[in-house]
Amino acid sequence: MELRCEKVQGVQIVHINGRIDSATAEKFGHDIDTLLGSSDQRFVLDLTDLQYINSAGLRVLLAMAKSVKKRGGRCILCGLSEGVRNVIELAGFHRILKIAPTLDDALLQW
């Protein structure tokens, strides 16, 4: 699992590549916590290159979204593959997390 960050139009974009599972969720959570230490209020998680996520990874996503919301910010997921989307929907997180089809669509929401 790798993260690559960039700022576009005042939005912190986090590109996630690989798998988020029990073996990588702790590192993912630490990396996300580091990002949340910044003053940024607007985040997009680009999951285009995320091949797999399990419940441990979903917990990190949910914690991030709650933390950002508590600070008055917003977090949007985009670029979900069919498999990742299915996991998110089965967990019911599509009702909690904001999801956009593409990165461009996510950026248009601000």
Image (cartoon, rainbow, N blue to C red):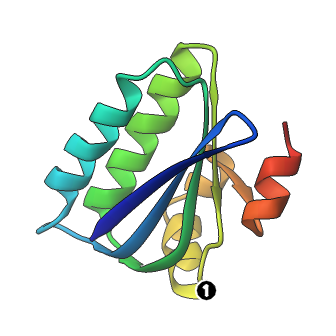
State the image coordinates of residue 13 (x, y, percent, origin top left). 57, 49
* Residue drawn at 23 percent across, 70 percent down: 21
- Closest to the observer: 93 or 77? 77
State the image coordinates of residue 108 (x, y, percent, origin top left). 88, 49
Q: Is residue 96 above or below residue 92?
A: above
Residue that extends furthest to the top in the rendered view of this protein: 71
Secondary structure beneath label 1: helix
Classify residue 84 as left or right of residue 99: left
Q: Quadrant of residue 99?
A: bottom right
**Residue where numbered disc 1 is placed:** 82
- Closest to the observer: 58 or 104? 104
* Residue drawn at 37 percent across, 35 percent down: 35
Q: Quadrant of the N terminus?
A: bottom left
Q: Is residue 108 above or below residue 17?
A: above
Q: Quadrant of residue 24?
A: bottom left
The number of discs equals 1
Q: Is residue 17 above or below residue 67?
A: below
State the image coordinates of residue 49 (x, y, percent, origin top left). 49, 79
- Closest to the observer: 89 or 81? 81
State the image coordinates of residue 18 (x, y, percent, origin top left). 34, 79
Classify residue 45 as left or right of residue 108: left
* Residue drawn at 52 percent across, 26 percent down: 68
Q: Quadrant of the C terminus?
A: top right
* Residue drawn at 21 percent across, 58 percent down: 25
**Three-letter amino acid code at the position of disc 1:** Glu
Q: Is residue 41 above or below residue 17?
A: above
Residue that extends furthest to the right in the rendered view of this protein: 108
